[in-house]
Amino acid sequence: MVTSSEDGTVKVWETRSGSLQRNYNHKSPVNDVVIHPNQGELISCDYSGTIRVWDLGENRCSHQLIPEEDVSVASVSVASDGSLLCAGNNKGNVYLWRMVQDHDLTKIVPIATFQAHKDYITRVLLSPDVKHLATCSADHTARIWNLDPEYPPAKAAAEARAAAGEEVQGPNNASSPIPQTPAPNGKAHMYQPQLTNGVPETAASQHTTVDRPHEYGSSSDSRDGPVSHPTQRDFDYEGSTENEEPSPQSLALLERPPIDPTTNTLYLETTLAVHQRWVWDCAFSADSAYLVTVCSDHYARLWELASGQIIRQYSGHHRGAVCVALNDYSEPR
């Protein structure tokens, strides 16, 4: 069992005995924590805008990501297959990284960033089939974004660009340029890769800050080494020649979700806009076809995503509904 706290720590507990197994320090209130599907890593985010990946086997922080300095990251989500990491912050911005396994190392490669809402994001959630991204916000909406390269509007746009003689982005087209989507605040935290022989030159290093974050041992370990606060990301240079195999990071960059050229965001499937107040949390059904949202207007709502319609509305809370969990038996057990 893992908990995160406003006291600035992430704690790992032995469920049966209640004993504390690990204690990791953010030095800032921790907003969210998730367990990686490999069961060997935790991902947490905090009020200062830092995302950290904790390696339970090595008992250390293996990656530190800072999408926007001093902008609170409210929520993180990891794909069910471990391929994607997503985060949302208080400016309404969403960040996506590809998690690439390179031998014994996990490398985290930024692949997209966009403004999903104009107000606080309260929750980001990747669907079980990794084809959709749900975002909840203080703007009274939840939005569903598409991650599937086979999404019909994305395919139609790609075909239109091809017919017009433009190069088309796609995971199977190594000569396609990567759309350059700078960070919403204009800072160079999300890089813009250049192509060499059709392969991006730059790729994220294992540690994405200039200095490695300090490491913590078990709950009794009080080491508190200095940590630099970087002004830009640290990247490995991945050169490429025609005879060299593309690096895992370079391949990950080519496997980007489709970007809507009219908005420079992921393709927006639907906006769930009936909510009267802040939308705090959501949960997908096992088949990724339905979503439950909860809101400060006291209601929980079950949505059919294909139609964007409410299937059922649940009332009974006398104050805001802020968390939801769904036990969906539609998945074979």
Image (cartoon, rainbow, N blue to C red):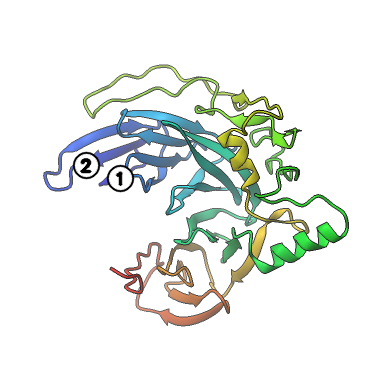
Q: Is residue 224 above or below residue 158?
A: above
Task: Relative to 110, say whether 240 is above or below.
Answer: above
Left or right of 268? Residue 26 is left
Residue at x 76% of width, y 59% of height: 158
Instruction: Give the structural element (helix, strand or loop) at label 2.
Output: strand
Tag 1 or tag 2, which sits nearer the N-term?
A: 1
- For label 1, the residue is 3
| Most distant residue in the bottom direction | 311
Q: Secondary structure beneath disc 1?
A: strand
Rendered location of residue 104, percent (x, y): 41, 31
Which sits in the foreground, 311 or 55?
Answer: 55
Relative horizontal placement of residue 258, taking residue 98 as reference (left or right): right
Residue that extends furthest to the left in the rendered view of this protein = 17
Closer to us: 233 or 235: 235
- Judging by the rendered image, the residue that carries numbered circle 2 is 13
Q: Mark 2 and 1 residues: CB-CB less than 8 Å, in contact? A: yes
- Give the residue type that dot 1 points to: Thr
Which residue type carries mark 2? Trp
Residue 68 screen position, x and y as percent: 60, 37
| Image x and y of residue 151, in percent | 64, 65
Left-right relation of 185 to 11: right
Crowding near pointer 1: few (<14 within 10 Å), some, many (20+)?
some
Residue drawn at x 60%, y 26% is: 235
Q: Which residue lies furthest to the front in this view?
A: 243
| Residue 186 drawn at (x, y percent) | 72, 38
The CA distance from mark 2 to mark 1 is 8 Å
Viewer-proximal residue among 270 and 81: 81
